[in-house]
Image (cartoon, grey):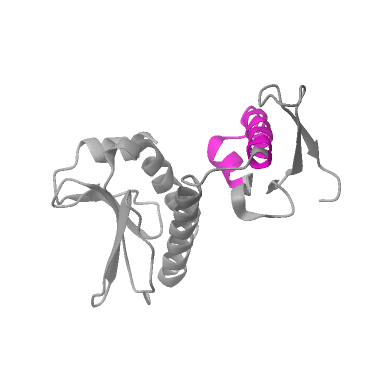
Amino acid sequence: MNLINDIISNSLNGAFRRISVEHPLDIYLGKDEFGHIAIEFKGVFKSRKVPSLKSFVVRQIEGTPKSQLFIILLNQEIIGIFTSFIEDIISSTKDITEEQLGYDIIVERIYSWCKMFQLSRQDLSESQVKGLIGELMFLKSLLETTNELDAIRCWAGPDKAKKDFSCNLHNAVIKSKLKNEGHTEGGEAYADTAGT
């Protein structure tokens, strides 16, 4: 998102800029006092415990009348992933006007992304690798007809859902089959779209 890159590249340490005047929630992007890229949400909300990781930290400040939630990037090597995370938060809250609901959605997105980061550090079994290859092949074909964010949202990922992909017109269970057993290349993805 060019707006995010523009805000990040033009922000001074400690300065934040509202992501959009059209967005119904007070969400800001900038850099904290140490120069770390961060997203900030201001609102009236009841806070709860929120996880942090080595790559990013969540800081909450209770205030009157508005409280603040910051998500601060600590590992600059994953700025592209963090930008996608920011885009996900912005998109997930674009139609939300109630601040507590906005906060709850942001926290839900934080938990989902934390889960993804934690799973990415675990070794996968051969069966899981085959399944992931099939899902990625289907995702690649889905990207030919759907924008990136919608395609990613369709993907259940490691959530153990009934369908590997589920949204609007795309409901699919992916089965991977290797052309030659013993080789992890040449997998084929089969979409079973019956029984949505």
Residue 34 placement, left or right of 107 = left
Residue 99 placement, left or right of 119 = left
Q: Residue furthest right?
A: 194
Q: Which residues are magenta?
A: 127-153
Q: Quadrant of residue 81?
A: top left
Q: Is residue 70 visible?
A: no
- Between 194 and 178, the residue placed more toward the observer is 178
Q: Quadrant of residue 6?
A: top left
Asked if the magenta segment contains residue 48, the reply would be no
Residue in view at x 43 percent, y 51 percent: 90
- Between 39 and 112, the residue placed more toward the observer is 112
Residue in view at x 35 percent, y 59 percent: 52
Quarter of the image with the N terminus is: top left
Asked if the magenta segment contains residue 152, the reply would be yes
Horizontal and vertical percent position of residue 113 = 46, 52
Horizontal and vertical percent position of residue 105 = 48, 63
- Between 69 and 128, the residue placed more toward the observer is 128
Residue 129's place in the image compared with 111, above or below, is: above
